[in-house]
Image (cartoon, helix red, strand yellow):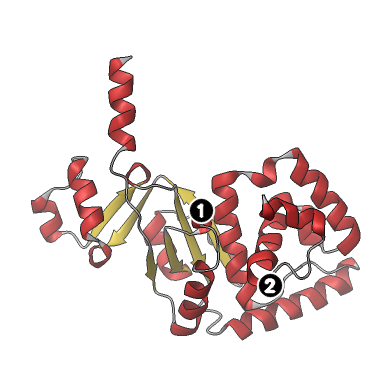
Amino acid sequence: MKNLVAFENYFNTNKVDFFAMIGINKEWEKVILDAINNIPEDAKPTVVTNFTRFKSVTGRKDIFNKNTTNNYGVTIQSTSIELPKEYMTDEIKDAIKEKGYYNDRVMEISKTFKIYDFLLYNSIQVVGFNCNTYKTLDEVSTRKEMVDKIYLEQKGAEYFFNKTGRLTIYHEFGHVYNNRMHISDSSDWKFATTKWYNECRKDIIKNPSEAYSEAFADYYGNNGARLPEYIKVFFKK
């Protein structure tokens, strides 16, 4: 038992905060920072990057393929991430040293460093935005309107609830929050989203996780103006 306590204390003391934005253009960056200042602490990602840099940061090569070229954003949870050395803060450097993961000789020649989730207060959440394909947020809005028009013609219903580039950013941060809090897994949320879908008929709402992010986006990015009260209560708790 003493060893277990020592082990738990080792990984739960002196945790730090970290945030980095990599490869994001100025228009996206401004709206991302505005959103981060407007959402709960647990919805803030560890790293925001563009699709091009997402692979090197997460080590995940399975996220993107020919079918994801026009996607808008992606969010994943990871146990570790690899970042360019210029993003290493003194706080992170000290935390890595304290846990014995820092080697002076290696860091002298390395261009990157690794952050592990046990160093941070919150789990590692990496958000990628497709700001190479969509240089402006208006381009995201235009694309979503076009997709929904085609979807409506083929399916007889619209897909998206939120269609603006700005709320697309909030949507991904909703995934961050949900990854940490697992709200969409609850039976209460699933029951509420069934009712919501029957009222709004946006097909994205059929998926409880996507429905949560759509609701999160409207609640924090649009003052909840389009949400029914029984959905808002999940954010007022």
- The image quarter containing residue 153 is bottom right
**Measuring 88% from the left and 67% from the top, which residue is drawn there?**
157
Q: Which residue is mark 1?
A: 42
- Labels 1 & 2 near each other (Cβ < 8 A): no
Q: Secondary structure at mark 1?
A: helix
Can you name the residue that lies furthest to the front here? 237
Question: What amino acid is labelled 2 in the image?
Answer: Asn
Question: What amino acid is labelled 1 in the image?
Answer: Asp
Image coordinates of residue 55 in percent, x first then y, are: 42, 60
Q: Is residue 180 visible?
A: yes
Nearer to me, 112 or 194 = 194
Above or below for 162 versus 83: below
- The image quarter containing residue 150 is bottom right
Q: Which residue is mark 2?
A: 222
Q: Pointer 1: residues within 10 angstroms few (<14), some, or many (20+)?
A: some
Image coordinates of residue 121 in percent, x first then y, are: 39, 47
Give the mark nearer the N terminus: 1 vs 2: 1
Image coordinates of residue 210 in percent, x first then y, are: 69, 56
